[in-house]
Image (cartoon, helix red, strand yellow):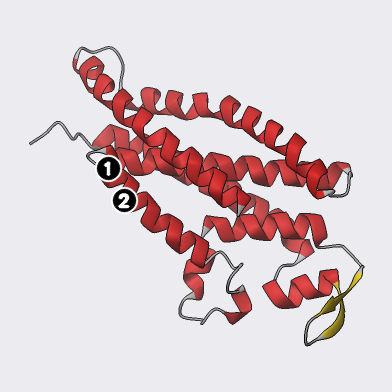
């Protein structure tokens, strides 16, 4: 829930900024100052260090508070997945704003996506229990992959025995595998999907700025 809340905050905070700067861009492009793709890629690039700092601050507070294991690989994976999550939420907000005429419409469309992302994230309804005709949306849901990465990287190798109501005692890693369908050996694939989401959203934003002009009547 924390990654979803902060991600939504990133997305909605980026949209009015993109909307205002797009108006300025129209004027400067007409004056021959610069073209669309370099402008859009510059907007993407400037978000990278800001999100990096945000992730570092979040990590310092949250990682020790939850008392996760202080091992280099688990620390790296947690940082990587949270950094990717904040990035793709930010780029999602920028992308939606570039596709819409104004900020109000972009906000409505974004929150429609957020509702579906939350519902099909695999937390409320685990992937094995999602009807097969809806499972495609789970795989297309970036939040579902984030949940997979965070849980698997931190708990996917735990051999601790726990009590599961109605099912007796189970080992943590086996519970994660059977309940959510997460596998420790697929962590690399999950990381690759995160990178793919970030690239697709950033490039969609860039090409939307290039080809959509909302000054036309």
Please state which of residues 141 and 108 is positioned toward the viewer in this rendering.
Answer: 108
Residue 117 vs residue 188, the one in the foreground:
117
The alpha-carbon separation of the residues under discs 1 and 2 comes to 6 Å
- Residue 34: give x, y in percent of width and height: 31, 16
The disc at residue 199 is none
User: Which residue is rendered at x = 59% and y = 81% of the image?
Assistant: 129
Q: Residue 61, located in which quarter of the rendered image?
A: top right
Q: Is residue 214 left or right of residue 164?
A: left
| Residue 145 seen | yes
178 to 18, vertically: above or below? below
The residue carrying pointer 1 sits among few (fewer than 14), some (14 to 19) or many (20 or more) residues within 10 Å by Cα, namely few
Residue located beneath label 1 in the image? 104
Residue farthest right in this picture? 160
- Numbered disc total: 2
Q: Nearer the viewer, residue 71 or 194?
A: 71
The answer to whether 47 is drawn above or below residue 71 in the figure is above
The N terminus lies in which quarter of the figure? bottom right
Looking at the image, residue 97 sits to the left or right of residue 114; the answer is left
Q: Residue at x 75, y 60 (%)?
A: 152
Left or right: where does residue 120 sit relative to residue 94?
right
Q: Secondary structure at mark 1?
A: helix
In x, y percent, where is residue 205? 38, 38
Is the C-beta separation of discs 1 and 2 under 8 Å? yes
Quadrant of the rendering where the C terminus is positioned: top left
Residue 211, percent across and down?
Answer: 25, 36
**What residue is disc 2 on?**
108
């Amino acid at each position: 829930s924390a990654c979803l809340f902060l991600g939504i905050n990133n997305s909605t905070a980026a949209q009015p900024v993109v909307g205002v700067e797009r108006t300025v861009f129209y004027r400067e492009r007409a004056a021959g100052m610069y073209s669309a793709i370099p402008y859009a890629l510059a907007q993407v690039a400037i978000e990278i260090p800001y999100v990096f700092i945000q992730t570092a601050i979040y990590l310092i507070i949250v990682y020790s508070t939850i008392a996760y294991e202080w091992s280099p690989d688990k620390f790296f994976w947690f940082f990587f997945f949270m950094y990717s999550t904040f990035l793709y939420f930010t780029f999602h907000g920028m992308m939606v704003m570039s596709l819409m005429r104004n900020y109000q419409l972009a906000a409505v469309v974004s929150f429609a996506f957020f509702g579906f992302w939350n519902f099909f994230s695999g937390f409320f309804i685990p992937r094995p229990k999602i009807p097969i005709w809806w499972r495609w949306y789970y795989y297309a849901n970036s939040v579902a992959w984030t949940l997979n990465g965070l849980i698997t990287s931190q708990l996917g190798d735990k051999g601790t025995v726990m009590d599961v109501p109605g099912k007796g005692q189970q080992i943590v890693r086996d519970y994660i595998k059977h309940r959510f369908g997460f596998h420790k050996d697929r962590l690399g694939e999950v990381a690759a999907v995160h990178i793919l989401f970030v690239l697709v959203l950033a490039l969609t934003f860039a090409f939307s700025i290039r080809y959509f002009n909302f000054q036309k009547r």
